[in-house]
Amino acid sequence: MEYSIPSLGVTGIISGNQIVITSESIVTISSYVANFKTNGVSISVNEVPQKSGVTSNDYNFPLKYIVTGTDGSTNEYTVQMVAPRVLGSSSLRLWFKADHLTLNDGDPVTNWSDVSGYGNHISQANSDYWPFFRKNQVNGYPAVAFRSTLFSEIELPSGGVGLYAGNSGSTFFVKRLVSVGAAITLLRLCETYGREIAINDPNGEYLVCRSGTGCTTVSALPMPRLQFISTGSVQTLISDAREYRNGKLIGQSALNTSFDYSAASNQDRVLLGNRNLDADIAEVLYFNTNLSEADVEKVFFYLNTKYGLSPM
């Protein structure tokens, strides 16, 4: 099946019987007309016949396309629009995509543009700390390789916009952990006393931290190594944090006042990696709120469909 929405200039990403439509720019979702191609003799959504380039559907909800073949058999396709700028009451503040980079395999990544709409672009001027671009790393998509031997990190040292509206936050990665060393930071917002997502040594567990004070494991389960997975955490104020892998909730941890980020210094800073990170990162999203379970499901539907990842 082929699927696109010409008015948005987007083409559906298809994985099996799942199709995700995503847009970097739209801030509201409404009804659209899709173009599609199948080998079926008829197609319907909620028993309404569909005609390519003609029929309009509301994309605020998943669409179930029923394709009927010449022999009367049917196939069902789930089409879902995921517009990250819409999720969490438009709280997306960081969105880094390796497939947004126009580089050759092995090129250094000196700049990585933020496509959240807030312009929180990160860069690295010092050649000693460059990560590198690698093509065809996961489901045909590229990734950015961070290596501790290269002291890789990339940052926005100041001037970040809208990164601290409160203590709640939701962070998602598509990454392959290569190895584990000391004091590994995936993402840090601030200089000290602010939000940090890290990996501990030696077990490689996912950590939610207040930089400079301490961390907590959420699931206490080691991260898989040498394979790409989608991971994420949702923090609700200073009460609790939830951890997900490939869309599955795998742990929840109670928090306390130690995870109050209001006193963070340099709250307009972004740091990706910290010279100790050994991982390949394909995509990063950060929302400045605790996403609902429905929105978390949409994020993982997008990431898992795009990168060909299965529930764990």
Image (spheres, rainbow, N blue to C red):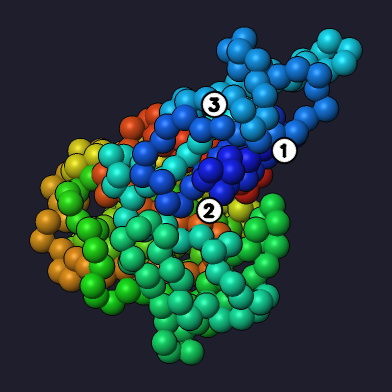
Q: Give residue 185's position: percent from left, percent from top.
A: 39, 65
Give the residue drawn at x 37%, y 39%.
Answer: 28
Disc 1 designates what residue? 2
Give the residue drawn at x 48%, y 81%.
Answer: 110
- Position above or below: 169 against 126: above
| SS for dot 1 | strand
Q: Which mark is residue 174?
A: 2
Q: Is residue 298 left or right of residue 253?
A: right
Q: Which mark is residue 56?
A: 3
Q: Are marks 2 and 1 in contact (CB under 8 Å)?
A: no
Q: Is residue 152 left or right of residue 165?
A: right
Give the residue drawn at x 65%, y 21%.
Answer: 50
Q: Earlier in the sequence, mark 3 or mark 2?
A: 3
> Which image quarter holds the N terminus?
top right
Task: For residue 309, say whether it is visible.
Answer: no
Give the residue drawn at x 45%, y 56%.
Answer: 284
**Farthest residue toward the front?**
54
| SS for dot 3 | strand
> Which image quarter holds the C terminus?
top right
Q: Earlier in the sequence, mark 3 or mark 1?
A: 1
Between the residue at mark 2 and the residue at mark 1, the CA separation in whole angstroms equals 25 Å
Q: Give residue 192's position: percent from left, percent from top.
A: 20, 68
Tell me which amino acid carries mark 3. Answer: Ser
Q: Which mark is residue 76?
A: none
Give neighbour class at mark 3: few <14, some 14-19, many 20+ (Cα, 10 Å): some
Point out the frontmost of discs 3 and 2.
3
Tell me which amino acid carries mark 2. Answer: Val
Question: Based on the displayed image, in which of its 4 quarters is residue 120 positioned?
Answer: bottom left
Between the residue at mark 3 and the residue at mark 2, the CA separation in whole angstroms equals 33 Å
Q: Earlier in the sequence, mark 2 or mark 1?
A: 1
